[in-house]
Amino acid sequence: MKLVLFDLDHTLLDADSNHLWIEYLMAAGLAGPDAMQRQIDDHARYLAGQLDIVGYIEYQLSLLAGASVAEWRARREDFLVSCVAPRISAAARQTVAKHRADGDCLLVISATHSFLAEGAGGLLGLDVLAAPAEVREDAFTGRIAGEICYAERKMVCLQDWLERAGRGFGDFSATVFYSDSINDLPLLESVDQPITVNPDPRLAAVAAERGWPRLDWRVAK
């Protein structure tokens, strides 16, 4: 049995879930254009390796103020069906199905906060490891209730997850990680089988130099 890890945004999902969510909120009149501009600016910082990940996640969670968690879950279901499911490619679905048929242990590990990441992962029946969104009195506080699975911290989050499950890397025949981002290089370098999917330019250069596989999981236009 292999331990198979998937990044979410621009990997399993041919898009950024936070970007799609803000577009959805804007269409519903629940966010203004300033939210999209911040998303665009933060994505540029992410690509440059300069993102304040704590501030980014807390801003994303602040957009969930003003309604109960139950109300947000109902909106999330509509969002997942209308915006997220169409951006999961057949190739991504087939790869997940193949690993599941092989009896592998599958896990999404994402820097996106848990409310969005767990919803997206659920479309594929996958467990998700992501920054927990703090909830009090059935409302999001805008704060994070645990570790953010970002860059080198993804390995820390994964090790903690394995410990809680009473497992270690030695319990698996191999470890595999699918990702698009240079920010995931620390975890890609730590697994037996690093696989790039829709890689950003910097990760594509590393993959070419090291002979790592490069897959295209984009959705046909």
Image (cartoon, rainbow, N blue to C red):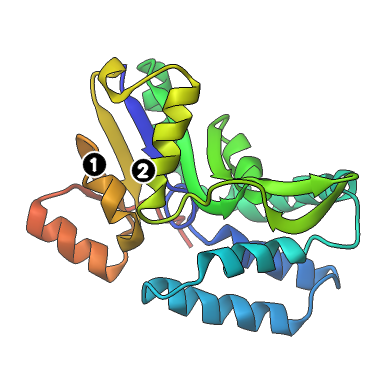
Quote the CA–CA distance across marks 2 and 1: 8 Å
Residue at figure coordinates x 41%, y 36% from the top left: 158
Q: Is residue 9 left or right of residue 184?
A: right
Give 132 or 200, whichever is nearer the viewer.
132
The 10 Å Cα crowd at callout 1, few under 14, some 14 to 19, many 20 or more, is: few
Question: Vertical placement of 29 versus 193: above or below?
Answer: below
Label 1 SS: loop
Label 2 SS: helix
Give 150 or 88, whichever is nearer the viewer.
150
Q: How many marks?
A: 2
The 10 Å Cα crowd at callout 2, few under 14, some 14 to 19, many 20 or more, is: some
x and y, in percent, of residue 202 in the image: 24, 68
Q: Is residue 151 left or right of residue 134?
A: left
Give 51 or 23, whichever is nearer the viewer.
51
Question: Vertical placement of 114 versus 209: above or below?
Answer: above
The answer to whether residue 94 shows anywhere in this view is no
Residue bearing the label numbered 2:
155
Pick the quarter of the image with the N terminus.
top left
Picture quadrant where residue 138 is located? top right
Question: Vertical placement of 73 versus 183: above or below?
Answer: above
Mark with earlier residue (2, 1): 2
The answer to whether residue 25 shows anywhere in this view is yes
x and y, in percent, of residue 2 in the image: 31, 22
Residue at figure coordinates x 45%, y 33% from the top left: 160
Residue at figure coordinates x 45%, y 41% from the top left: 157
Residue bearing the label numbered 1:
190
Three-letter amino acid code of the residue under disc 2 = Met
Question: Vertical placement of 30 versus 99: above or below?
Answer: below
x and y, in percent, of residue 127 in the image: 55, 31
